[in-house]
Image: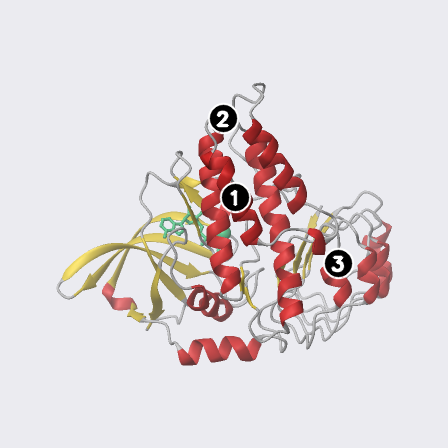
Amino acid sequence: MLFCSDNPFTELPEVLGRCEQLDMVGFKSCRIEHVPAAALPPRLRWLILTDNRIEQLPPEIGRCSRLQKLALAGNRLQALPVELAACQNLELLRISANRLTELPGWLLELPRLTWLACAGNPCCADQEQATLTHSPITTIDWNSLQLEQILGQGASGVIHLARQRLDGETRPVAVKLFKSAMTSDGLPESEMAACLAGGEHEYLIPVLGRIEAHPQAVQGLVMALVGPEFSSLAAPPSLESCTRDIYPADSRWSPEQALKLASGMASALAHLHARDVLHGDFYGHNILHDGSGQALLGDFGAATLLSAMPRELAEALQKLELRAFGCLLEELIERIVPAEIVDPRLAGLAALRDACLDPLPARRPDLQAVITALMPLRARPH
Ligand SMILES: Nc1ncnc2c1ncn2[C@@H]1O[C@H](COP(=O)(O)OP(=O)(O)O)[C@@H](O)[C@H]1O
Ligand SMILES: [Mg+2]
């Protein structure tokens, strides 16, 4: 692997293409304008070109058949080369904050594409602006917040415990401060628009407002504090696992707990999809749970608003997220105990997993169908 972030490269070096074993390349926040075909290593699996000046990708990217993760947020792309359709292993794609006027049909047919972020492009930016202006998010004065310890962090932000002074009293809250204007998932504005559009739901982490008057103009969100009895379901993917989360070695679920968690998350996603929000980062590492199956989905950093898009396109995009739900089911099923006892509920869950992972996105169920399939599994006596 090679990481060269924050260096003044204007071109992806051609020498990389001659590195036979190189599978991970990161050039975040450089000044890259040109990606020569010769610079693409044959075994490329993970390419990070976030926050550069790239206007087009070489068609030869289609030869990178092992490509699984492609991070292109914050560039100047007006289109993606159709040859990318040959990258059948592509699972995670970040193309937020570019100049894309439309999403090509072939992209939505990729058999394994699961996590897509495309906010902040002309194809959806108007909608974001409209959401932000028509339902402005509550603003919370930075000076009313007193930051305490760090609760967690991800690619885009650092989350602190904080006290908010409100009407003469203080309440504990969680504050997410964005690390920079451009994150690997996109822009903070897009995250805020998606939070607003997503609204409230029993299984979503509640967002209270957006920070204003930070002395260095750092952007941030204030959320309801999720109690210490909740922890992340999993850690983000490792360099090795690339696209899949890392679960604690002792993570185990009873069928009841797994079904409760799956049902809660299906209902949160159904709520988002009904409101034309694609989460884009539906992963165990963005789910907080209390060990009993009670869970909350957070992190709208990679979310995309779909309301400005034609219905068919929006529905096709949602089918990508069904695959993410299938991955979660797969991960839960692997950890259900006792696995050796024949439990008809496990067979039902496995069938649902397979349907969600169908390589033909159009054949995957929608979330209402998922909820309907989960209901009898939860009700069934055992
Ligand atoms: N409202 C909250 N209350 C308590 N902890 C939180 C809250 N929101 C986030 N966290 C912690 O911070 C971590 C990262 O939050 P997330 O929103 O996913 O940030 P990022 O966008 O940087 O990935 C979470 O996994 C969790 O541990
Ligand atoms: Mg996160």
Foreground: disc 3 or disc 1: 3
Inspect this view and state whether residue 50 appears.
no
In the picture of the structure, the residue carrying the numbered disc 1 is 284
Residue located at (31% from left, 44% from top):
227
Q: Residue furthest left?
A: 168
In the picture of the structure, the residue carrying the numbered disc 3 is 109
Sequence-wise first label, 3 or 2 = 3
In the picture of the structure, the residue carrying the numbered disc 2 is 250
Residue located at (74% from left, 62% from top):
107
Residue 183 in percent (x, y) is at 55, 62
Image mark for residue 201: none
User: In the image shown, does 36 or 9 lie closer to the viewer?
Assistant: 36
Residue located at (58% from left, 72% from top):
120
Foreground: disc 3 or disc 2: 3
Please report contact status of discs 3 and 2: CB closer than 8 Å, yes or no. no
Sequence-wise first label, 2 or 1 = 2
Displayed quadrant of residue 126: bottom right
Please report contact status of discs 3 and 1: CB closer than 8 Å, yes or no. no
**Spatial CA span between label 3 and label 1:** 24 Å
Residue 246 lies, with reference to residue 315, above or below; the image says: above
Residue 32 in percent (x, y) is at 71, 68
Inspect this view and state whether residue 228 appears.
yes
Kind of residue sitting beneath label 2: Asp
Q: In the structure shown, which secondary structural element does the residue marked by tag 2 occupy?
A: loop
User: In the image shown, does 89 or 109 lie closer to the viewer?
Assistant: 109
Q: Residue furthest top?
A: 340
